Image (cartoon, rainbow, N blue to C red):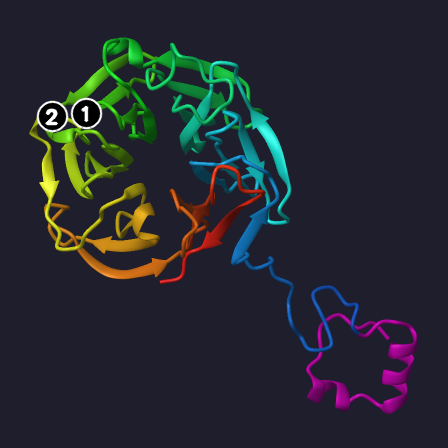
């Protein structure tokens, strides 16, 4: 007898008993294409709640999820290299360059096959040098498929007499990159041809003696949202008129604001590292104002930034301390 489809239990009972016994003996039942005894279909494994990666003293600062290759890309303050982490906790070195003493924020420009890396030197790498300590600011761009270095753009040279810490990156629809500087009140721009310039510079963007500008995201309506760590200020910076930037009004303290993630085109997820919290912020005023809708407590793990995975999940990075034997990537649940 040819059996061409799955059968519900009621249908199976309608078979003569000897036919069912023959089918079972022949191994037919339960192995038909797309069938099982309980009529369940196979599905992709659920995204894990937590991935713990046993890499000692890596101290990653930035993270992006590479959907095409099913892996996270992570940076390293202490080693400079960029690596990949998979759901099974395996870590593999992906890209490096001798000039990268500390890799900080990452931006995966998947449509252009680029991985953008903010490069700095705050002394965390044993190879740190006096001439680069708090002076290095650069943007390294790698091929996101094979890790080949495409370009290395010196940003600190634009203001050689100032301290620098290139922190985070955003990319607009035309492929222009924007990079924050935590030790100078500057957002840099690197156009699609690799030409660097100071996009906006203003004392209001300064962090004083602490960390200033940090996380940055591009909004599809034509502006940047930028966080300042020392006081938790969010700024809205129009791409066509950056000097007219404005403060986003909020009653929620975002002191310690670090990485940002903008979703479709809201909410805005803000990792406030010093508060050990991820805040979910929304706006009904085109980001003239914002308000809190929910939050996620991370615990004392020094969370830095956050990335999107598929259409529904966001993962926050736990680097722990700089000497920790591991780091973790954790699904945010509001």
Q: On the picture, is 194 further left or further right than 49?
A: left
Q: Residue 270, can we see it?
A: no
Q: Quadrant of the C terminus?
A: bottom left
Q: Residue at x 50, y 25 (%)?
A: 80
Residue 319: x, y in percent?
47, 43
Q: Residue at x 40, y 56 (%)?
A: 298
Label placed on residue 105: none
Viewer-proximal residue among 33 and 233:
233
Q: Which residue is mark 1?
A: 185
Report which quarter residue 152 is drawn in.
top left
Report which quarter residue 41 is drawn in.
bottom right
Q: Residues within 10 Å of mark 2 (few under 14, many from 20)?
A: few
Q: Residue at x 27, y 62 (%)?
A: 294
Label placed on residue 203: 2
- Residue 82 in magenta stretch: no
Q: What span is in magenta?
A: 1-29
- Marks 1/2: CA–CA distance: 6 Å
Residue 70: x, y in percent?
56, 43
Q: Residue at x 91, y 73 (%)?
A: 26
Q: Residues within 10 Å of mark 1 (few under 14, many from 20)?
A: many
Q: Quadrant of the N terminus?
A: bottom right
Marks 1 and 2 in Cβ contact (< 8 Å): yes
Q: Residue 201, can we see it?
A: yes
62 shown above or below 141: below
Question: Is disc 2 placed on a helix, strand or loop?
Answer: helix
- Residue 16 in magenta stretch: yes
Q: Earlier in the sequence, mark 1 or mark 2?
A: 1
92 shown above or below 101: below
Viewer-proximal residue among 155 and 223:
155
């Amino acid at each position: 007898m040819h059996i061409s489809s799955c059968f519900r239990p009621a249908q199976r009972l309608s078979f003569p008993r000897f036919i069912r016994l023959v089918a079972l003996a022949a191994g037919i039942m339960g192995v038909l294409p797309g069938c099982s005894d309980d009529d369940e279909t196979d599905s992709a494994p659920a995204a894990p709640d937590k991935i713990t990666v046993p890499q000692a003293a890596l101290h990653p600062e930035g993270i992006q999820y590479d959907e095409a290759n099913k892996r996270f890309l992570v940076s390293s303050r202490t080693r400079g290299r960029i690596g990949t982490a998979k759901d099974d906790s395996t870590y593999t070195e992906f890209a490096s360059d001798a000039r990268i003493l500390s890799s900080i924020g990452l931006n995966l420009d998947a449509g252009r096959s680029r991985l953008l890396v903010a490069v700095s030197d705050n002394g965390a790498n044993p190879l740190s040098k006096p001439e680069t300590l708090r002076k290095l600011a650069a943007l390294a761009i790698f091929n996101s498929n094979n890790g080949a270095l495409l370009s290395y753009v010196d940003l600190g040279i634009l203001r050689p007499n100032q301290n620098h810490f290139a922190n985070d990156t955003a990319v607009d629809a035309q492929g222009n990159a924007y990079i924050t500087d935590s030790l100078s009140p500057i957002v840099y721009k690197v156009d699609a041809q690799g030409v660097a310039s100071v996009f906006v510079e203003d004392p209001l963007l300064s962090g004083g003696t602490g960390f200033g500008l940090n996380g940055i995201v591009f909004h599809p309506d034509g502006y940047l949202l930028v966080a300042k760590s020392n006081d938790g200020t969010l700024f809205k910076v129009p791409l066509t008129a950056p000097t007219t930037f404005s403060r986003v009004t909020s009653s929620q303290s975002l002191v310690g604001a670090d990485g940002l993630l903008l979703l479709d085109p809201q909410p805005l997820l803000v990792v406030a590292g010093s508060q050990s919290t991820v805040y979910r912020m929304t706006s009904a005023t085109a980001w003239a104002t914002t308000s809190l809708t929910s939050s996620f407590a991370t615990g004392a793990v020094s969370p830095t930034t956050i990335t999107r995975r598929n259409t529904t999940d966001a993962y926050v990075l736990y680097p722990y301390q700089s000497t920790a034997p591991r780091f973790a990537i954790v699904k945010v649940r509001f």
